[in-house]
Image (cartoon, grey):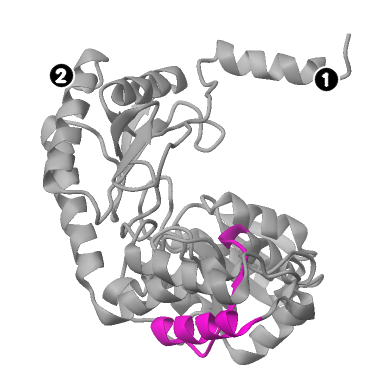
Amino acid sequence: MGKLDYIERWVQELKEEGVYRTLPVLEGACDAHIQLEGRDIINLSSNNYLGLANHPRLKDAAKEAIERFGVGAGSVRTIVGNNTLLEKLEDTLATFKEEEAVICFQSGLNCNIGTIQAIVNKGDLIISDALNHASIIDGVRLSKADKAVYRHNDMAHLEEILSTRRKDYQTVLIITDGVFSMDGDLAPLPDIVKLAKQYDALTYVDDAHGSGVLGRSGRGTIDHFGLHGEVDFIIGTLSKAIGVVGGYVATKNPVKEWLLHRARPLLFSTAPPPAATAATIAAVELLLETEAYTKKLWDNARHFKAGLEKLGFDIGISQTPITPVMIGSEAKTMAFSKALLEAGVFVSGIVFPTVPKETGRVRAMVSAAHSIEDLDRAIHVFSEVGKALGVIA
């Protein structure tokens, strides 16, 4: 037997369970329509909420940055990888988020992996929502703090943990997603902030799916709830609604100074490429100028959700443009996704271990770049596939 036979067995098990997948290969830009195997497909699976990933203004900014700064940063930020573009991006994001300071990372995942372990230590306690993103879970695991998990959005359970354990720790950090990516529901941030004040705890919100989507022109979940200055650490991504790549932490100046000395992704991984940084600046400046993109996103989302609900699909508890269509079994979920693609609509199946077993769903992600005709076509395809597979009557 070969040394890697056990991995081959694992792959075979995926195939037997009906959840094995091959990666789609795009033949052009990720937009409202994508090219796959020579076919034009309606794309309902990207995080490109505002349609900015292929925006001319962002592409022009990227090209100009390459001419001046080259294609790579050449170093970690703490040596010679920092540049005027990164400094400008952080200032622009701080203005947009209406927070004191912003520090940028290479990705949203790196934000969580780098920040959590840097801001708590042995003798501290992290209290995390049960459905927090995998990158939060990994960041918590890397820290030396003790950990506790509260039932999803259950404020009574959170308070129970705080009331019984707060006295035993120096610092307590409550961590939650702002928008939960699998179901599209929101964290009850006003209640979390209230409990944090009552029990002298810090608050940490990963707003990856709220940034660019909720609040004024996409300022995020904190803006949506009117909590500026009330949340200690706000994490956002630049690869979803912003349309490029990277992540950021919006916080206070001393935290920014500390992270530049202790956040390991900043110390040991090359800074973001200039083209991406410049394109991100252009995207944020666009949102500072207009709410048209977020308005179109929400108009499209409401239209699409209403169409699916009218057909009888279960779209869960979503409060955002994230629209899960609940299927159930893993194999049936993947069959549903495959049938949608064959009919010209790409919607990725989400199954265990990303979600609990027997809660498989296809997760539709509407963008501002879709036309009403695109969405009506997609709704029609959902209807045909749903009836054929017995998901709806």
Q: Residues within 10 Å of mark 2 (few under 14, many from 20)?
A: few
- Residue holding disc 1: 4
Looking at the image, residue 234 sits to the left or right of residue 295; the answer is right
Looking at the image, residue 254 sits to the left or right of residue 386; the answer is right
Q: Residue furthest front?
A: 67
Quadrant in which the C terminus is drawn: top left
- Nearest to the observer: residue 165 or residue 36: 36
Is 90 covered by the magenta stretch?
Answer: yes
Identify the disc placed on residue 18: none
x 54%, y 51%: residue: 130
Hey, what amino acid is under mark 1?
A: Leu
Looking at the image, residue 358 sits to the left or right of residue 386; the answer is right
Q: What is the secondary structure assignment of the residue under circle 1? A: loop
x 22%, y 49%: residue: 370
Disc 1 to disc 2, C-alpha distance: 46 Å
Q: Which residues are magenta?
A: 83-109
- Residue holding disc 2: 393
Is 75 covered by the magenta stretch?
Answer: no
**Residue 364, position in %: x, y?**
32, 41
Please tell me whether residue 336 is drawn above or below residue 141 in the rendered image: above
